[in-house]
Image: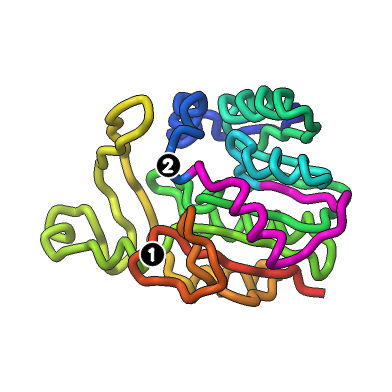
Amino acid sequence: MSSSPLPKASKEWQKFFDAHAANYEQNPFAQHTEAEVEFLLSLYPLSRGARILDIGCGTGRHSIALARRGYKMTGLDFSKGMLFEAGEKAKAAGVQVQWVLADATEFKFPDPYDAAICLCEGAVGLVERGEDAEAHDSSVFANIAASLKPNAPFVLTALNGYSVIRQMKDEFIAEGRFDPNTMVSNYVDEWDLPEGQTRIQINERLFIAPEVVKMLRTAGFVVDNVFGGTAGHWARRFLSLDEVEAMYVCRKRP
């Protein structure tokens, strides 16, 4: 496993994923890997041996599934715990994947890749309190673009801001849980995780599809489509307002 400097090693999200890594693949949304990989390859067919970069790879489930199909995979994540699990799973699967410990806002690769994926909110949206979410996600997109060949495909799934906004109420504004002027939500949530109920401090800037498309275009991508991206329900269909994630189907500009 190679690594790059992690100047913000005390990040709360890092701590969360390190602690959650051993149980991550027990989550219901992580049960559709094979179908998800087949759908990705239907969007942009790639020749066997193509080099693919998986940003925010977590425990490596997509990287490993693609490596089994003959692709040369690099998985990048800022969680040592997640990458440890990924390494163990790759050994068990009998495949080789390059695992890179790095922050998605601060990485560079000398040789450009043939394609990239960033799935299940793997890197975007993971901001700390007081951090500029637009600057954070824009940096991730710019780094991905810089790591790709011209016309190389990039598929992103990210939180669907429409869904969260539709759940907000005026009393949440009064309580300071949501600011409609900044589109930032700030509250403590209870997550039902495999290891049990866990209290999580949520600090999110809610981005809707046109905002994400604009950031992607600024970073150097052509956005071919925006689809519904909720795990287990990927298809060439319109994004539903109430689903958890959106899928952005892109290519690096020539």
Residue under the point 65% across and 47% down: 55
Q: Nearer the viewer, mark 2 or mark 1?
A: 2
Front-lying residue, 26 or 250 = 26
Badge 2 marks a residue whose secondary structure is: helix
State the image coordinates of residue 84 (x, y, percent, origin top left): 63, 24
Front-lying residue, 247 or 254 = 247
241, above or below 84, in the image = below
Q: Which mark is residue 236?
A: none
The residue where tag 2 is placed is: 28
- In this image, 9 relative to 13: left or right? right
Q: Residues within 10 Å of mark 1 (few under 14, many from 20)?
A: many
168, above or below 253, in the image = above
> Looking at the figure, which quarter contains the C terminus?
bottom right
* Res 223 → quadrant: bottom right
Front-lying residue, 196 or 1 = 196
Q: Is residue 42 magenta?
A: yes
Badge 1 marks a residue whose secondary structure is: helix
Front-lying residue, 123 or 108 = 123
Residue range (magenta): 30-54
The number of discs equals: 2
State the image coordinates of residue 253 (x, y, percent, origin top left): 77, 73
* Res 202 → quadrant: top left
Alpha carbon distance from label 2 to label 1: 21 Å
